[in-house]
Image: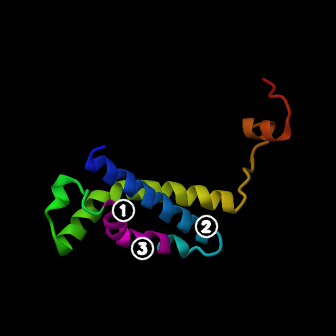
């Protein structure tokens, strides 16, 4: 597997972990979304911990603040999409969401009540 593919998988994993944390905490407090989003700041630490010296070529030779900045820029969209998806998924499951039909003639209403849809 290429280094950039490993990098992407690690970023997606970190997005899923932070999204799960953010979603679980946000069931109790709405400010938890912010806490989960702030975990993005440590994405570079997680990536370097897992990949060690197997970073993509375009950021491999960088050091210090440049390396951190390059990792955060390269990881943002992958991390963000996984964080958002898992935050909303875990939050929705955590609050035991059930749909509420606002129209008695809607398909959702008929499906929830077990009645046939009449034309």
Residue 67 is drawn in which quadrant?
A: bottom left
Mark 3: secondary structure: helix
Q: Residue at x 38, y 51 (%)?
A: 9
Vertical side of 13 occupied by 27: above or below:
below
Q: Residue at x 39, y 68 (%)?
A: 40
Labels 2 and 1: the sequence-earlier one = 2
Circle 1 residue: 50
63 sits to left or right of 52: left
Nearer to me, 116 or 40: 40
**Is mark 2 in CB contact (under 8 Å) with mark 1?**
no
Circle 3 residue: 38
Circle 2 residue: 24
The label number, if any, that marks residue 78 in the structure image: none
45 sits to left or right of 88: left
Q: Position of residue 112 (x, y in %)?
A: 80, 41
Q: Position of residue 12 (x, y in %)?
A: 41, 54
Q: Residue at x 18, y 59 (%)?
A: 59
Q: Is residue 99 magenta?
A: no
Q: Which residues are magenta?
A: 35-51
Magenta span: predominant SS is helix
Q: Position of residue 49 (x, y in %)?
A: 35, 67
Mark 2: secondary structure: helix
């Amino acid at each position: 597997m290429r280094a950039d593919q490993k990098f992407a998988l690690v970023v997606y994993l970190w997005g899923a972990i932070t999204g799960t944390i953010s979603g679980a905490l946000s069931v109790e407090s709405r400010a938890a979304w912010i806490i989960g989003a702030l975990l993005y700041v440590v994405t570079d630490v997680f990536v370097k911990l897992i990949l060690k010296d197997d970073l993509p070529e375009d950021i491999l030779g960088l050091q210090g603040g440049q390396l951190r900045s390059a990792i955060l820029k390269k990881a943002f969209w992958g991390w963000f999409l996984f964080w958002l998806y898992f935050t909303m998924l875990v939050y929705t499951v955590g609050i035991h969401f059930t749909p509420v039909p606002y129209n008695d003639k809607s398909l959702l209403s008929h499906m929830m009540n077990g009645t046939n849809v009449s034309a």
